[in-house]
Image: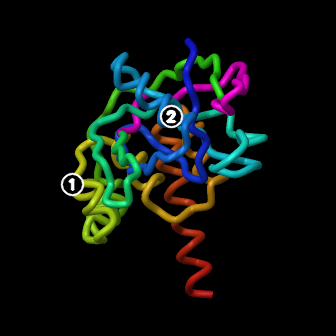
Amino acid sequence: MKLPLFPLNTVLFPGCTLDLQIFEARYLDMIGRCMKQGEGFGVVGILEGQEVGEAASQFAAIGCEAQIRDWEQQPNGLLGIRVEGGRRFRVRTAQVLKDQLTVAEVEWLEDEPERPLRAEHADLAALLNALAEHPMVQGLGMGGVVTGQQALANQLAYLLPFPVPEKLHLLGLGSVDERLGVLQGMLDQLQGDSTA
């Protein structure tokens, strides 16, 4: 499956919302094609390079499909789009086109079926509920009450201020139990660092 890529200094997770301002010709063309064909594009974390200008020289091999949910002309004249994370994928091969758009051959990754939250997830669910009070999170329409383990793990991994490499590690984990366990460990470490 061929997928145009949008390398960013952020990591998108399934079911999560991301607002983007589009101004480069390669991405305006890409968004136009995606909207006409009713298809998404891939968001991958930049490992080396910039979001603007020449194509990023190195990006993560794991990414997340971005499905366009809304768009509008911004007051500054730029195109604003809101995307929602779809399926996770692994980049098999990639090439940079003449216009500096990167196109990749991707393999979709399987996700476990959604399972209900259990008692041991209460603290993580409470944290997500607290994050929902933040104006930025409210603006994205995220946070609050979730009923599934995947939704809880994905939203926390997306919203919490972890560095890109740690978020990429979380995105690459196929097991939701593993993702929730790693998240809990990262939070325990943060709390330990803040009390030290």
Instruction: Using the image as rendered, state which of residue 92 and residue 110 is in the foreground.
Output: 92
> Considering the image in quadrants, where does the N terminus appear?
top right
**Residue 64 shows which numbered tag?**
2
177 displayed left or right of 165: left
- Seen from the viewer's position, the closer of residues 108 and 81 is 81
Which residue is rendered at x = 56% and y = 25% of the image? 4
Q: Determine whether, in the image, residue 23 is placed left or right of residue 92.
A: left
Q: Secondary structure at mark 2?
A: strand
Residue closer to the observer: 191 or 64: 64
Q: Which residue is mark 1?
A: 145
Residue 70 part of the magenta segment = no
Main secondary structure along the magenta-highlighted residues: strand
In the rendered structure, the answer to whether residue 132 lies left or right of residue 14 reads: left
Q: Position of residue 157 (x, y in %)?
A: 47, 53
Q: Is residue 2 left or right of residue 55?
A: left
Residue projecting furthest to the front: 77
Task: Say if the magenta span includes residue 89.
Answer: yes
Q: Residue at x 57, y 72 (%)?
A: 190
Q: Which residues are magenta?
A: 84-101
